Structures are given as C-alpha cells and as structure tokens.
Image (cartoon, rainbow, N blue to C red):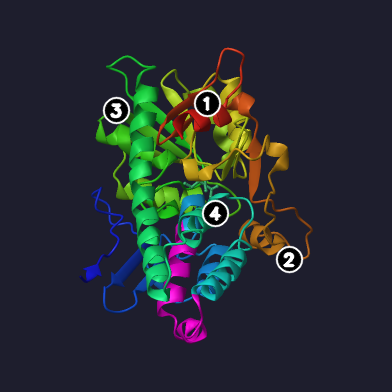
Amino acid sequence: MLLMMSSDNSKSSANTLRSLIFTPSTSAHSPPSATLSVLDQLLLPHETKYIPIRCVQDAWSVIRTMQIRGAPLIAIVAVLGLAVDLTSYPSTIRQLEGLGVDEIKRVIVEKMEYLKTSRPTAVNVFNAMEELSTTILADSSLTTREELLSALMTHASYMLERDVSDNRSIGSHGADEILAKVDERTNVRVITICNTGSLATAGWGTALGVARELCSRGRMEGIACLETRPYNQGSRLTAYEILTEKMPNPCLLCDSMISSYLATKGSSNTVCIVGADRVCANGDTANKIGTFQLAIVAKEFGVDFYVASPFTTLDVKLKSGKEIEIEERPPGELLESSGAPKDMKCWNPGFDVTPAAYITGIITEKGVVRRSEDGTLDVEGFVEKMS
Ligand SMILES: CSC[C@@H](O)[C@@H](O)C(=O)COP(=O)(O)O
C-alpha cells in the first residue's frame, strides 16, 4: 500500500498559515521516503517563502537561525528532518547501505545528539529524541533497515499529528477554565507574549490556541500582544496570526507598555495566557524573555496568568527553574533590532524563568494543573496521575 500524506496544519481553521509541509511516502515494497519544507519565519509577515529541509544539517540550521522557532515546532522539525535525512538524503542512504540494524541505530543516535545541540532551552527537542529512542530504537522486533526506517517515519508522522490534536485539547481545556471564572454574558480580554500559534507549533497553537478557542466560542472581547523585544515574535508573527484569524479588537503593545495598559485599560475579564519552553516539576516555567515581567505586572493588578503547555514541554526531571539552561542569543541580534551602535556591549538572553508563585495554572492537553491550597503547582504529581 502506498501512503501519501501531506500534513495540513491549516485544516482546522479558516487560516492559511502552515509552518511546514511534510510529504511522507511508505510502501511495503520499497524503503520509505519523504520531503519537508518549512516556512521561513524571519521573512514574515512580508514574504511567504518555504525552505527545503533535506538533512539534519538543514534542520539544525533553520532551528539555530530561528527561521523556524517555537518549542513544539523546533521538536517537530528536528524529528521530521531526521526522518527525511535517513530515508531520502542521497549521502545518508549511501552511508546506511550494507549496515546492520545496530550500526544504523548508532548513526541515528549520532544524528539525534547533533540535533539536540541546536538550541538549549526548549525541552521539546530533547523529549522528542528520547521518545524516538524508547519507541523505535529500543524496539527489538524491527530487524531490517526497511522496518526500522518505516517505523521511524510512521512515528514522526504521528508526532506531527499529535501536536495539532494536543493543541486543540489545550485550547478546549483553557477556554473551559477561563470561562468558568466569568459570567456567561461576559467575554474575555486576552494578553499574550511571543508567538505561540500555528507558526510556533505543528498547527493551531498553545496559548494562542486557547485564544482561538475563545474566539470560536464567540467569547473573546479582544486580544493584546506584546511586541516581544528584541526578536519581535509578537509584532511580526502573533499580530500576523491574529489578523489572519480575524480576532476581535486586536492591539499591539510595546513590552514596556504593559503596566500602563493594565492600569488604564485592565478589567476583571482580562487574562494573560503565555506559552512555555520548559516547565519544571514545581511549575517554574521558562518562556520567551519578558514573560516574567508580564507575570509580575499581572500579579500586581490581580490578573490571572496562565501557561499553556503540552506534555511535550514538561520537564519534571528538573525540580525547579534554577536548573534550566537559558539560551543567550548573539549580541548582534539585539544591536541590529535596537539601532544601537554596533560596538555597544549587551546581554541577550532568549528566555526567562517565571517562578510558579506567579502562575495561576498550567493548561495542558490532559487538563489544568491548578495551584493547591498550600500554594504549590504540583506538575510532577499531575504528570504521574495522568500517565
Ligand atoms: C508554543 S510556543 C511556546 C514558546 O516556545 C514560545 O512562547 C517561545 O518562547 C518561543 O521562543 P523562540 O525563541 O521564538 O523559539
């Protein structure tokens, strides 16, 4: 049987944003093959251009340069890039010829270790490689190259589809949680940071997915997105998604405007919803730089602050945020976008850690981790209960 499947991460919405196009082909009679291209997010919103990914080096490069970004999407591109490399890249196919299954597994592990060096903070790529190891590499029933690569391709396609369906569930749980706190005639005003939508995931989005669900239920009054300096994921990408989705009352804010915004325009139906790059056992959450500041201001004004995170972004091996490695981006990225003299010294961390004490709840595809009476956010206990 020939399976041709092109991932369509736009099908669940009227929008046309597709972060990637993946076309696998598997047959009982020949080895699997696939093609992959990804949307160059550095060119958005002005130009729509897809970049072909033929090998793990291509995947690594688009992740490192942030041509694709967003914790779930980084992992999906790493997994699909690995699948394409192993099944369809001529020099890898030549390298694998004549090798036994154990030797092929060693080659795969090397490629996975390489992909893990692309960006350090989002846990998703590490979790994805771990998942491939435990489901595919550890499966002793896969005894030929064809079986091994077909299983890997099938699992990669599954991870792609799962990311979209997990996001849909996050949207649904998040909307239920937030709407339970307002009366049925009141609509919600959302504040968000960075980009957590279709562009940051395989489709639909996490925090922005909750906003989309509120919209589709007719319960959103408006949405404000922070510019998200210095890379401007909010002004370039989230603003673009919000307009594409035709969300009501969109509003762009500089990061430094948030206190004034809440002081003058905040109301009891306002809620902050942000994404995550790594959520620890105690609920401490790494996300885009500026998230912690938003959480502090939200607390000051009594605004609920939710983190939307799939299980693939949880890292309960880490007890607290102190253990998270924070990526430092090249100074040039800050200097160029700020217009500073090129010799100016600067510090350019890509992420910060919001302590659990500032977080109202973590919205996952399996439900919401809420603060318990003793004030803790027991992510580890939730994972144990749900697994
Ligand atoms: C669903 S995306 C969640 C996070 O990955 C997002 O908020 C974020 O911090 C992205 O950072 P980026 O540096 O653009 O990859």
Judged by depth in the image, the label closer to the viewer, 3 or 4, is 4
User: What secondary structure is found at the residue carrying circle 3?
Assistant: loop
At label 3, the amino acid type is Arg
* Mark 4 vs mark 2, CA separation in Å: 41 Å
Which portion, as a residue range, is magenta?
76-100
* Mark 4 vs mark 1, CA separation in Å: 42 Å
Look at the magenta stretch and give its main secondary structure: helix
Judged by depth in the image, the label closer to the viewer, 4 or 1, is 4
User: What secondary structure is found at the residue carrying circle 1?
Assistant: helix
Identify the residue position indicated by label 4 in the image: 130
Q: Is residue 242 at all visible to an observer of this figure? A: yes
User: What secondary structure is found at the residue carrying circle 2?
Assistant: loop
> Residue 262 — which label?
1
The residue at the point 31 percent across, 50 percent down is 244
**Image height check: is 375 above or below 192?**
above
Q: Is residue 81 magenta?
A: yes
